[in-house]
């Protein structure tokens, strides 16, 4: 569940030092979109070969619709099946945006309040020995202002590093805290099925995955996505790969894994499914049981904390509620990236342009693809 900052560099491979080596000519009748898609068809496979990335799935949204959805390479470097539009990847930290959406809907319904201290919702304290835990709210969790580190370890037990609300520190533990509250308010814990995680943390199975599937995934047309391993997902699942391009052991999430990681990085999805989720942002709805109303969505995407230069992730200048934000005069771009063993992910979306993209890779080297200047320059055309 390690968080990776993919876009902190604008490095460019010597192989692609000149855009003219691969860029498509603009012929009579060609549109800018035609050229973009043609360039992507050529560039992505070249980058995959250079960086030993076995498989990639990508989806492009323009003017509110998915206009391009394509798989490249193979699910497994040993040749076991091509990546196609139904190939499932671990979404890693872009899962946080889906969870944030669910939290905002609970706030809209009055089940949860953004600025009520979370300790009031739980029967037992989340952290002993530090009264500052009583200051932590859902707003602070979603904007990474809790003071918790990303994940606890045996060497670094869970602790609060600054007064909640006073600074920014990216934290998966904060999401686990809020997920525990959501489970308390909407679901149940199965204490007959438990496991130990980081620093001997005991976690028991919950139905948080089922809740997110029913309340976010299905209503947004994410029908090939989920949180708990099953045969349907397994049939289309991409194998993770390390930096040398060799397959890694495939993680098959259990009910206790879901209870620990669902909100922070547990989603399994396709590029098309995640595009469907992003497209749902273009049409917020009043009086809908699952989709946010305009006011709730505006609050979710409103910058909450400005980032110092040393805090910036993926070029974001601020953080909203579950989403990083690149603030631009011609319209903000909302984004998130993700990285965990053998998988990398990146998505960006502009509400003003009703455009965006999702890219999923089954390799630890996927970040090199995302940070390539030629690729990022081409994709940036969606937001101009």
Image (tube, grey):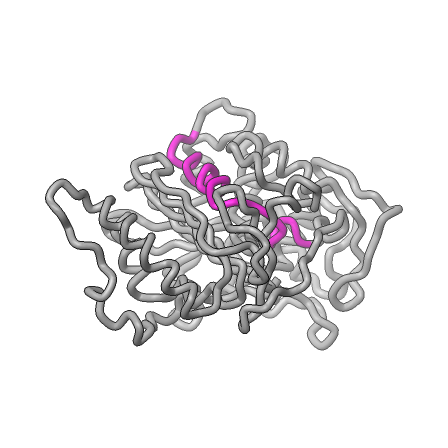
Residue occupying image coordinates x 72% and y 49% = 259
Foreground: 381 or 326? 381
Which sits in the foreground, 92 or 67? 67
Q: In the picture provided, is 191 more to the left or to the right than 379?
A: right
Give the vertical position of 316 relative to 282 (above or below).
below
Find residue 158 and report its horizontal and vertical position in percent.
Answer: 69, 67
- Which quadrant would residue 182 be assigned to in this image? top right
Tell whether position 218 is magenta. Answer: no
User: If the image is split into quadrants, where does the N terminus sit?
Assistant: bottom right
State the image quarter where residue 340 is shown: bottom right
Magenta stretch, residue numbers: 261-284
Prevailing secondary structure class for the magenta stretch in the rendered image: helix
- Let me know if residue 266 is in the magenta part: yes
Residue 299 in view of the camera: yes
Quadrant location of residue 28?
A: top left
Q: What residue appears at the point 13 percent right and 47 percent down from the top-left corner?
A: 27
Give left or right: position of 212 versus 51.
right
Residue at the location (75% across, 66% down)?
Answer: 129
Percent across and percent down for residue 208 are 69, 42
Answer above or below: position of 68 versus 203.
above
User: Where is residue 8 drawn, in percent x and y?
Assistant: 39, 69
The residue sitting at the right extreme is 192
Q: Report how many numbered discs are placed on residues in the image.
A: 0
């Amino acid at each position: 569940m390690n968080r990776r900052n993919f876009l902190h560099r604008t490095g460019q491979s010597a192989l692609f030092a000149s855009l003219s080596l691969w860029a498509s000519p603009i012929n009579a009748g060609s549109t800018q979109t035609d050229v973009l898609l043609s360039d992507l068809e050529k560039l992505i496979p070249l980058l995959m070969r250079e960086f030993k990335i076995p498989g990639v799935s990508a989806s492009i949204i323009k003017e509110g619709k998915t206009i391009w959805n394509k798989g490249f390479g193979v699910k497994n470097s040993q040749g076991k099946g091509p990546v196609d539009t139904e190939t499932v990847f671990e979404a890693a930290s872009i899962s946080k945006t889906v969870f944030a959406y669910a939290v905002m809907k609970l706030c809209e319904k009055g089940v949860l309040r953004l600025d009520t201290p979370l300790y009031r919702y739980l029967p037992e304290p989340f952290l002993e020995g530090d009264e500052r835990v009583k200051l932590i709210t859902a707003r602070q969790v979603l904007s990474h202002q809790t003071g918790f580190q990303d994940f606890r370890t045996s060497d670094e037990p869970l602790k609060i590093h600054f007064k909640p609300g006073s600074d920014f520190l990216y934290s998966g533990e904060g999401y686990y805290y809020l997920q525990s509250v959501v489970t308390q308010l909407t679901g149940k814990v199965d204490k007959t099925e438990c496991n130990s995680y980081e620093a001997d943390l005991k976690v028991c199975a919950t139905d948080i995955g089922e809740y997110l599937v029913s309340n976010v995934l299905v209503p947004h047309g994410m029908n090939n996505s989920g949180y708990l391993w099953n045969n349907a997902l397994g049939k289309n699942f991409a194998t993770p790969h390390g930096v040398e391009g060799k397959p890694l052991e495939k993680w098959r999430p259990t009910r206790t894994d879901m209870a620990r990681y669902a909100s922070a990085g547990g989603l399994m999805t396709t590029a098309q499914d995640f595009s469907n989720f992003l497209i749902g942002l273009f049409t917020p709805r009043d009086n809908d049981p699952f989709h946010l109303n305009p006011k709730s969505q505006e609050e979710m995407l409103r910058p909450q904390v400005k980032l110092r230069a040393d805090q910036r992730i993926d070029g974001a200048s601020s953080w909203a509620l579950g989403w990083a934000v690149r603030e631009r005069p011609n319209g903000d771009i909302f984004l998130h990236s993700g990285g965990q063993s053998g998988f990398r992910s990146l998505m960006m979306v502009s509400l003003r342009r009703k455009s965006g993209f999702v890219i999923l890779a089954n390799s630890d080297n996927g970040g090199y693809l995302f940070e390539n200047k030629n690729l990022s320059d081409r994709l940036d055309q969606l937001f101009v």
